[in-house]
Image (cartoon, rainbow, N blue to C red):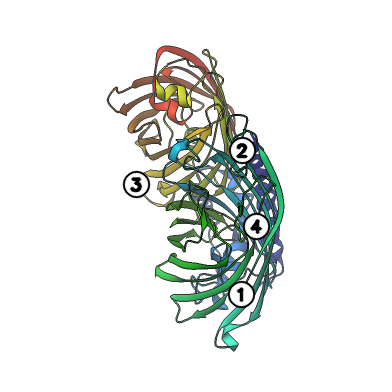
Amino acid sequence: MRLVFYLFIFSQLLNFVSVLADKYTKESSETKKIKWEKIQEKNSNDLKKIIWKYYKDDKSYFQNNNEESSKVKKTENYRDENIYNSKLKSNPSILEIEPYLPLNNFLDYGDFQTSVRWKSSFDGGVSGGTGQQNPSFVFDYGLSNSSLISIYFSEADDNLYNLIDGQLSNYHWQNYAFSFKKKLLEENENILGLSMVSTLEYWRQASGSENTKSIYNQENNSYGKDKFENIIGAFSLPFSKNFNDKLAVVIVPGITFLPEKLGSKGIGKNAYENNFYVGSGFVLDIAEDVDLLFSYTTPLGPGNNYFDSELKYSRKPIYSIGLGWDINPKIGIEGKLSNSYGSTPSTGLLTIPSDNKPLYSANLIYKPYGEDTLLEPLNDREKLISYGGITVNNALIPKAGTSQINLNYDSKGNLFGFYGYSLSNIFQLEFLNIGRFNDNNISTLYSTYLSENNLNYRLGGKLLIFSPQKDDLFWMTVRTSVGRNDDTNQGYLFSELINTFSLNDKLAFNLSPKYFFSGVDSFGGLGLSSYINLFDNLQLIPEINTSFKNDSDFNSSLALRYSLKPGKSIDLYYSNAVGIQDIGQILEDNEYRIGFKLNFLY
């Protein structure tokens, strides 16, 4: 439940960040000098026809007309001054290759960005599930054009990847980090660029439980939890060289300060200790707004960054390789492969506890001051669709700055709540997708993820690829979510490629291939649905889902949607899907249930 609390706090922080960024952009535009220009008179009727046709009667878009205009002018001024271009030697929004490998890039004074990062093993090892995760959140702020502060939070809570003495062993990490980076040498004036980076962290560690032995207890075989709290730190000096507009290389000597011993029950060394290291890497611009990131780091000791299933400590080189894509100046994503499990500057050198496995990470970078992708506004029928479906989602995304809330309850006791926030016109972050299934099916899949008294909480995102709002033939989005069942502590990944087609003013339909991946089972599915407009504020929504596995499931739903007023609607439905949250959409129940779903956009 701690993760749910942190996600809620982080969602409110991003709301605040977005409001502050809008205010900052507006104030900046007001300081620009007004340029007067003589224009020829236009027939007012012609202008009305053009505006009326383009905005499809959506008057809300005229409320922000001045703000959008100022953003366009701001962008043009940047281009005129050769400041706002896609690449400046290396992508300035990439502040680090890894937390322990910072780059000599900085944000402009007063600019800030936030990142959500998800790091995981490809499987759960002996603990099961889709993998051992270490999610983290990062906030970067430009204290000046040559100094940057970064705040990190990360938390990992699982059983160890391998058995220790033939038994499962629980562990817990939680990090709060504050980092300061200061430019020492400007590359334009010297052969190399150089910065100084110092980090201070509060690290909480725990291992063991009532049923498992702590890895810090080597004296006896008694069970119990050991807890430790330490102040740790890191220091590094990144040297960088930009060879051309496409390639930036960095070499980083550094040191991490970690405890050598934890508790009084250890025999010899039972912790990582301090480590000198030398890291190197590069950022290569391989296509417009797409960068290749690579690094290789060697720990030099005297401490270690790895321990095995026999609790023997040693040193392992750390590598990472991945791609970064700036979808637009507001939203960036990164995907990486690495054996680094820690998510802060002081712990980034550490491998996954009890092993040295390749891990994957998916990172979202949000720059609230950046320009967004401009889309043609939705008409009234499309706005009704944008509330989503019941068991088949659609590809529409509410416009930037919009919050979406869904509340669901059905006659079998299922209860779900959803909160999403559109960080951009093309990306919605699903901060909170939480609820419980009330089903007593005894299969392994059900008992793992839909067990009695379960509580499933999930985090995800939805990215727009195609849209008629930017002259494409149809809507297409990619949606992915991750999370776990609080009862069994097991999780799964759920992805879908959602396609929405508008045939005419009365009819639209969805085609949604889906994929479920877990440590218990993995299989695909397909969802089909349509939206039939009965009246301007009333829709009929038939849906079907099927799964592709040995014992295939097939479910159907029929919903009636009524819009009470703009931004509010209610769905009444009849369905034999197990539930409306991810896995429940593609599983079949023995009985139909009646349910309702409240939808809010604001």
Q: Which secondary structure, mark 1?
A: loop
Rendered position, 45 above or below 530: below
- Percent x, y of residue 419: 59, 36
Q: Using the rendered image of the protein, determine whether residue 563 is visible from the camera's viewpoint.
A: no
- Mark 2 against mark 4, which lies toward the viewer? 2
Rendered position, 352 above or below 500: below
- Mark 1 against mark 2, which lies toward the viewer? 2
Q: CA distance from mark 1 to mark 2?
A: 43 Å
Q: CA distance from mark 3 to mark 2?
A: 67 Å
Residue 298 shown left or right of residue 274 in the figure: left
- Mark 4 against mark 3, which lies toward the viewer? 4
Quarter of the image with the C terminus in it: top right
Q: Mark 2 sits on what residue?
A: 220
Q: Which secondary structure, mark 3?
A: loop
- Percent x, y of residue 261: 66, 53
Q: Give residue 473's mark.
A: 3
Q: Which secondary structure, mark 2?
A: loop
Q: Give residue 260's mark.
A: 4
Q: Residue at x 47, y 15 (%)?
A: 440
Q: For the residue marked with disc 4, what is the amino acid? A: Glu
Mark 3 or 1 closer to N-term?
A: 1
